[in-house]
Structure formats: structure tokens, C-alpha cells
Image (cartoon, rainbow, N blue to C red):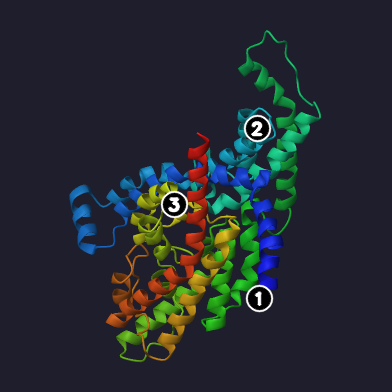
Amino acid sequence: MAGSSSVLNEKIIPFFQKISGSRHLVALRDGMTAAVPMIIIGSVFMIIAQFPIQGYQDFMAHTFGANWATVVQYPTNASFHLMGLVAVAGISYNLAKSYRVEAFSSMIVAIGAFILTIPLKTDKAGDMWIPLKQLDSSGLFIAILVGLFVTDLYVWLVHKNLTIKMPSSVPPAVSNSFASLFPGALVLMVVWVIRMIVEATPMESIPNIITFVLQDPLSHLNNSLPGAIVVELIICLLWFFGIHGSNTVSGVMMPIWLGAMSQNAAAVQAGKEIPNIVTQQFYDNFIHMGGSGATLGLAFMIAFLSKSKELKTLGKLVVGPAMFNVNEPIIFGMPIVMNYKMVLPFILAPMANVITTYTAMSTGLVAKTMGIMVPWTTPPIISGYLATGHISGAVMQIINIVLDGAIYYIFFKSIDKDRLKEEIQTNEAA
């Protein structure tokens, strides 16, 4: 045991600390943090528009019109759904700054390269537009790659002096613009060539790469416990690397989950035994409580158990959205993306939920979901009862939340301790 502890403290932990302190991961962390305020703003309006009480929905529709929810979510579209765009700008800016290269020009080139990866749409009038979906978390993985590697290419070209140098009398803003002209053009040409190569393959476009790679293996998973575990593992791993795991996986699995839900609804109407455990409600209401990674318990700990001022402030902002299963503020604010300290509980907590819920439903201890489409924003305990029509569903959710909190606790305390130590050192240095 002592030998294992020694290896952990002397080799493994320093190795990961070195990685987490690397130039690229620091830029990734700081760049993603720039998106957090926008995410929180969008989350609030999303909850207002999708507040899971039918009476509220009916009242709002009657008072403000049938499209009231669409209008309310305008700020969401202008904030939450620009996550990828904000991320690529923030990552590129911070990475270029770490190289002591003019950061604003690098950021502009990175934004252009990111837009270049997206297939534009054309309406009936012939006007071109960018699908908003590709600018939010659905395009986040591409945004991260562009922010990191395109910026590295740009910096390399600048360091090779492939720039246009202006006289010292020229204002800096003009000089910087001309300095970025040649390296920026080369960067866009490289991305353009990559796009044409990808479009010549069955993947058809760069945003389709992840879906294309995952589609075939995911389509072979059925409504079994091993299948549910594999699906959840993929969701968590994708999120860790900055890819919206739920959206990516549901694109393939949604027909299977909705088909299982319809079978359950038909069985309830016919008075027969409910056949399926793994449905859309299984994941939305019992596995992803607080959002992907089952982070509701973590949100409460950040809000009420933190000693670090930074985490206390974060907790006030994340606990509300988490109760409605919106956890992007935690994923990018803590952060969990590319944070080796949080990857283990982020995977273990929802895995535990899959095993406990599936086992409880298969043995009859907890009622199976009835095929009712409970809104994913419905808070836990309420959603468990509505989805199953039985109090056992709510009890199952309580058990899972407690279990998730226990899994996250040690990791949360370690991060809280480190943040508190950093704050004390900063205050002493000041």
C-alpha cells in the first residue's frame, strides 16, 4: 500500500499536474471559462421557456401567444448557442498570448477558420446562413481543435517571419492587421483544403466526423444493461473532451429509445406488463440528474460545502440550473472538460445510476417508465414520479442523488482544498 501511495504521489500526480499546467490546457481552460457567463445567461432563459409545469406553459401560451417560448429563448440563442464560437475565440486568444504573439489577430483568424469548417445553408431567396447548431456545443469539439491547432500553425508562421512589416509610424492596429494577412491566409487555405478532402469522403462535412465515427457501433447497442453502460461511458468520455456527449449519442440512439418508449406506452394502455427499461426517460430522469455526469449532488456541494471563495461564487450560479438538469455552467465553470481530477467521478456517478436503476427496475423494486415524455428540465423527484407513475421512481432518484454525492465528495474536497490554498497564497503575496 505504501509503495502504491509513493508511486501515486511521486510519479502519477506530478505527471498529470505537468499536463494540466501545459500551455495548451491552460489556454483551453481559460478560453472555455470565457463562455461561462454566456452559458449561465442562456440557462436562465432556457429554464423560463421550458419550465416543466403544464399549467405554467398553458398560462404563458394563452397570455403571450403560442410562440411565447420561442421568443423567450431569443437570449438563449444569442448566448448559450454561441458556446463554440466563444470557445474558439477564447482559446485562440489565450494560446496566442502565451506565445507572446499579437492575440487579437490570431483570434480573428481562428474564428474565420472555425466558420470555414461549417457547411453553409442556402434559403429559397439564395441567401446563405450558418446553422446556429454548429456554433453551440454541437460544434464545440471542432472549436477546440481549431482554437488549439490552427493557433499553433498561425504562431509558427509568425515566428517564421512570414508577415508584412509596416513602418513604425503606422498605427499599431493597422500594423497588426497587415502582419496577420499572410499567415492568416495560409491558415485558411490549410483549413479549406482539409474541408475539401473531408467533403470528398462519406463523412461529407467536418461537423459530421464524430457522428460518422460513432454511428455504426452505437446502432448495434440494444436495451440491455451492458448496452446502457457502454452508451453512458461514451457520453461521459465525449463530454470530457469537450464534445456534447448527449447530443452526439442521441442522434443515433434516439430512434431506439423513442421506439422503446412507445412500446411501454402501448403496454400501459393495453394493461400489459411494461417491456423496456432503457428509454429516453431512463437517461433523462434517472441517469442524468443535474445533467450529464449526474452532477446535481456536486452542484449542492459546490454551493453549500465550499470553503474556497471561487467555488462558493460558482456554486451560487450553478445550483439553480442544475436542479433543472442544466449543467453546462459546472462542466465549463469548474471545469470538468479536460480536467483529469474530475474525469473519474464524472464517469462513475452516472455509471452507478445506470446499474442501480436498471437493477431496481428489472427486479421490480422500482416501476419502469410508462412511456410518458417527461420534459428533461423537470427537477428530480418530481420527474421520477411522473415518469413511472409510482413513488418508487422518486425514491430511486433520491438514492441515486445521494450515491452520486458520495462519489463526487472526495474529488470535490480535493479541488476545494487546492483552490483555497491558492487563494491564501495569493492573499499573502499581495
Residue closer to the observer: 1 or 67: 1
Left or right, 215 with reference to 316:
right
Cα–Cα span, label 1 and label 3: 38 Å
Say which quadrant the N terminus sits in: bottom right
Q: Earlier in the sequence, mark 1 or mark 3?
A: 1
Quarter of the image where one finds residue 4: bottom right
Residue 304 drawn at (x, y percent):
35, 57
Q: Position of residue 189 (x, y in %)?
A: 74, 37
Query: Can residue 19 be seen here?
Result: yes
**Hey, what amino acid is under mark 3?**
Pro
- The residue furthest right is 160
Whole-number angstrom distance, CA of label 1 to CA of label 2: 49 Å
**Badge 1 amino acid:** Met
What residue type is disc 2 on? Ser
Q: Position of residue 71 (x, y in %)?
A: 32, 45
**Residue receiving disc 1:** 1
Q: Could you give the CA–CA distance between mark 2 and mark 3, rounded to whole angstroms?
A: 27 Å
**Residue at 40%, 78% in the rendered image:** 262
> Is 301 situated left or right of 152 in this image?
left
Q: Which residue was labeled with disc 3?
A: 329
Q: Which residue is mark 2?
A: 106
Q: Is residue 161 above or below residue 334?
A: above
285, 293: nearer the viewer: 293
Q: Nearer the viewer, mark 1 or mark 2?
A: 1
Residue 242 location, quadrant:
bottom right
Task: State the image coordinates of residue 75 (x, y, percent, origin top left).
Answer: 37, 43
Between disc 1 and disc 3, the foreground one is: 1
The residue carrying pointer 3 sits among few (fewer than 14), some (14 to 19) or many (20 or more) residues within 10 Å by Cα, namely many
* Residue 390 at least partly seen: no
The residue at 64%/28% (across/down) is: 105
